[in-house]
């Protein structure tokens, strides 16, 4: 099952991302909706509860390029995503990172990690090929995350 450029998980009124997503993000992720300052994506890798936040401004590549008015709201969205993953999954560690080596569009990974996960203690990037969600599991996971994030 290949994700479309966006997928609203049964919420037809939620529309589409406010900004164009880099093709790699559109290919590898499912769009869940919007927070205050970011679009929320779910990485299509069932090995890890893995959210990606994309700030609502085109052309950004790094944190220091965020306009001052977006700094606090983006930070709050990261905090909100972290709390949702912590509440739903009780991870051993939360990883929050913005790399951008392969995808230059500013995006922030928020990943729930567990001592027994497939990549532990190494980073998840490139450790194993992605294991896409089965459709039913994807819908259940997306619904749980949307509820925890307050995306309705």
Image (cartoon, rainbow, N blue to C red):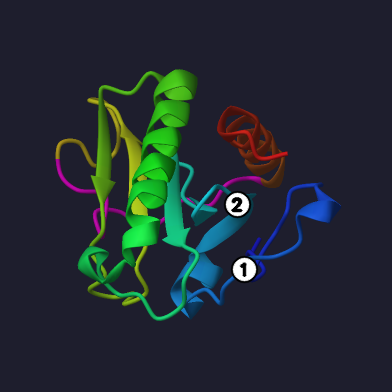
Which SS does the magenta portion mostly show? Answer: loop
**Other residues around mark 1 within 10 Å, as few (<14) / some (14–19) / many (≥20):** some
Residue interval drawn in magenta: 122-134
SS of the residue under disc 2 = strand
Badge 1 element: loop
> Residue 48 appears at what percent x and percent y?
40, 39
114 over 99 or under it: above or below: above
Residue at position x 44%, y 62% from top? 55
Left or right: 15, with 104 as reference point: right
| Quadrant in which residue 92 is drawn | top left
Eyeballing the image, is 84 above or below 46? above
Residue on which the image places disc 2: 34
| Residue occupying the point 63% across, 64% down | 3
User: Up-down: is 24 above or below 128?
Assistant: below
- Residue 18 coordinates in the image, percent (x, y): 62, 68
What residue lies at 49% left-to-right and 54% top-to-bottom?
Answer: 37
Please name the residue that numbered disc 1 is placed on.
18
Please, which residue is most extreme toward the front here?
69
Q: Position of residue 114 (x, y in %)?
A: 28, 27
In the image shown, does 114 or 69 lie closer to the viewer? 69
Which picture quadrant has residue 49? top left
In-image side of 59 versus 118 (left or right): right
Residue at (38, 59) in percent of width and height: 69
**Residue 123 visible from this viewpoint:** yes
State the count of labels. Answer: 2
Front residue of this view, candidates 37 and 115: 37
Q: Are marks 2 and 1 in contact (CB under 8 Å)?
A: yes
Q: Which mark is residue 54?
A: none
Farthest-out residue, right: 12
Mark 2 residue crowding within 10 angstroms, few (<14) / some (14–19) / many (20+): many
- CA separation in Å, label 2 and label 1: 8 Å
Q: Earlier in the sequence, mark 2 or mark 1?
A: 1
């Amino acid at each position: 099952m290949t994700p479309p450029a966006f997928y609203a998980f049964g919420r037809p009124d939620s529309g589409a991302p406010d900004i164009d997503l880099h093709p790699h993000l559109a290919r590898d992720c499912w769009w869940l909706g919007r927070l205050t300052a970011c679009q929320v994506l779910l990485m299509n890798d069932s090995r890890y509860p893995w959210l990606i936040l994309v700030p609502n401004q085109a052309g950004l590549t790094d944190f220091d390029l965020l306009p001052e008015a977006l700094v606090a709201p983006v930070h709050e969205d990261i905090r909100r995503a972290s709390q949702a993953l912590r509440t739903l999954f009780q991870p051993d560690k939360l990883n929050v990172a913005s790399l951008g080596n392969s995808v230059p569009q500013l995006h922030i990974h928020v990943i729930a990690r567990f001592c027994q996960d497939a990549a532990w203690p190494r980073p998840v990037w490139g450790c194993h090929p992605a294991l896409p969600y089965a459709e039913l599991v994807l819908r259940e996971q997306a619904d749980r995350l949307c509820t925890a994030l307050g995306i309705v």
